[in-house]
Image (cartoon, rainbow, N blue to C red):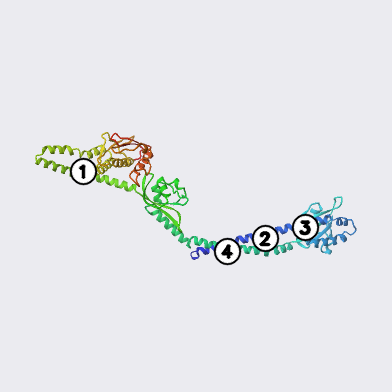
Amino acid sequence: MFRRSVSLGVSLLVLQVVIVLMTTCAAGLLAAKLQSDRIREAYKDRMLSVAESVARLPTVVQAFDSPDPSATIQPLAELIRKASQVTYVVVTDRNGVRYAHPDPKRIGERVSTDPTAALSGEVFVGTETGTLGTSLRAKVPVRAADGRIIGMASVGILESQLADDLAEDLPELIGWLAGAALIGVLGAALVTQLVRRRTFRLEPAEIAQLLETRDAMLHGIREGVVAVDDRQRLALVNDEALRLLGLSENPTGQPADQVLDEGLLELARAEDDRSDRLVLAGERVLVANRMTAKTHDRAVGVVLTLRDRTELHDALRELDGQRTVTEVLRAQAHEFSNHLHVIGGLLELDRRSDAVAYIERVGGAGSITADIIDGANADPALAALLLAKSSTAHERGVELRLDPDSAVDIRAGDDALTVLGNLVDNAVDAAETGGTVRVLVRSSAQGVRMVVDDDGSGVDESQRGRIFDLGVSSKGADRGIGLALVSRVVTRRSGHVAITDSEMGGASFDVWLPETGNR
């Protein structure tokens, strides 16, 4: 309940203030430690310097040979102590007996700490507890003119004085740290306001809900959605787009030119918005729309929406194939009935020669359907396709013939139906009214060969190298899909396609699709 009641702004501010204060405190402790070490090092250097000066002072060395060394050394040691601002300056003889001490009563007594190190010729710097308390001290041997060790000079300062020196520096340090903490808190408040503006003052739960809703909508709709940012990288690809583009992994973040086909890439790079454009993605014919994505009136990328036209065409083609067989047979029965009525009328009028001529003229009309059914009896789908195309061609005044050399021993497969359907459509368009299209289909265990000839104007040799490119067509905009799809199917099946001049006067398309075992 508490976490739900605390807003994002308050949480951000509190977290940042805690971080600033913890960082400031840590920095303060570190600075105090560094300052303490600096003070200690400075005093070590000073004490060592004073102790060495006392030990090498000629007056002190010479006093060791006098009957009363302390009479000379004590006043000199006190003068040096006051001048150097240390706690004590002590001078002892070879046995550690004091010749000088801040407390005159201690003169003549042996020192309370171990003088062995200095009296053995070493220099000692460290913290020890003596008669005046715990202090940081330096001990240096006193040597005679011939180098013999005749005593020791010890200089020290109480630890309490070191603490006092550090305490004098702390108010300034604390002031700087407080100022830094204040600036940090103000900065945290400013950052909190900036983050709140960038998140439109939404709470984390609201942001998560919006994200979940957006993902559910984008990945649940039946249209493919592809978002490309202003750097030409994919910002979003939903599940339907992955299926339509044939992608197994989400390519979000990759460059668009490494993922999208040429048609989609060209649409994404267009300068203006476009709608219902036919593009080819792999072997799918898609209807694509382009819309510029804007935020705060600034273009940040483009959004492409994709709809699958291939599945619709396949479904319609299959439905047409089912209907065509019935409709053609019904039309032939009706046409045959009309022919009988005409023949019967001519006979009643006793115009036998006209009846014979009429019979000769229309006698072959019903052979087209029979040829198709007989030539493709091993593949009902192929027969249905040819019947549908024959009916369509007949409506446009074009005769569709099945080459007598056709032999369909096994099913041709979906790829062959796709290729043949597109080739026949192009041939009918090229033949125009009164023209003829001839189809040869040979299907065997090795593969499928399809040859489509027409008596149209043919294909100029200069265009044969690019006629299979997407968008190359003489039929206007949004065309040039069929032959591009044929090329991609042939390439995938490792087949080949050739364009030559047909003996009928137009173009001849010869396609070979080797058997792959996957029909």
Q: Using the numbered discs, state the Cα–Cα distance from disc 4 to disc 3 in whole angstroms.
A: 46 Å
Q: Assess whether mark 3 and mark 1 are in contact (beta carbons under 8 angstroms).
A: no
**Label 4 residue SS:** helix
Residue lying at 60% horizontally and 64% vertically, measured from the top left: 182
Instruction: Choose the circle earlier in sequence order: 4 or 3.
Output: 3
Label 2 secondary element: helix
Q: Is residue 311 left or right of residue 252?
A: left
Q: Earlier in the sequence, mark 1 or mark 3?
A: 3
Is residue 497 in view?
no
Q: Secondary structure at mark 1?
A: helix
Which residue is denoted by mark 1 in the rendering? Answer: 329
* Position of 3 relative to 391 (above/below): below
Task: Give x and y (percent) for residue 209.
Answer: 44, 59
Tell me the SS state at disc 3.
helix
Q: Which residue lies under the disc numbered 2?
A: 32
The kind of residue on which mark 2 rests is Ala
- Using the image, tell me which numbered label, if any, was put on residue 186: 4
Foreground mark, 4 or 3?
4
* Residue positioned most to the right: 67
Task: Report the amino acid beneath label 1.
Answer: Leu
Which callout, 3 or 2, points at the residue further toward the start of the chain?
Answer: 2
How far separated are the C-alphas under marks 1 and 2?
104 Å
Q: Which mark is residue 47?
A: 3
Seen from the viewer's position, the closer of residues 402 and 108 is 402
Q: Looking at the image, is mark 1 or mark 4 earlier in the sequence?
A: 4
Mark-to-mark CA distance, 4 and 2: 25 Å
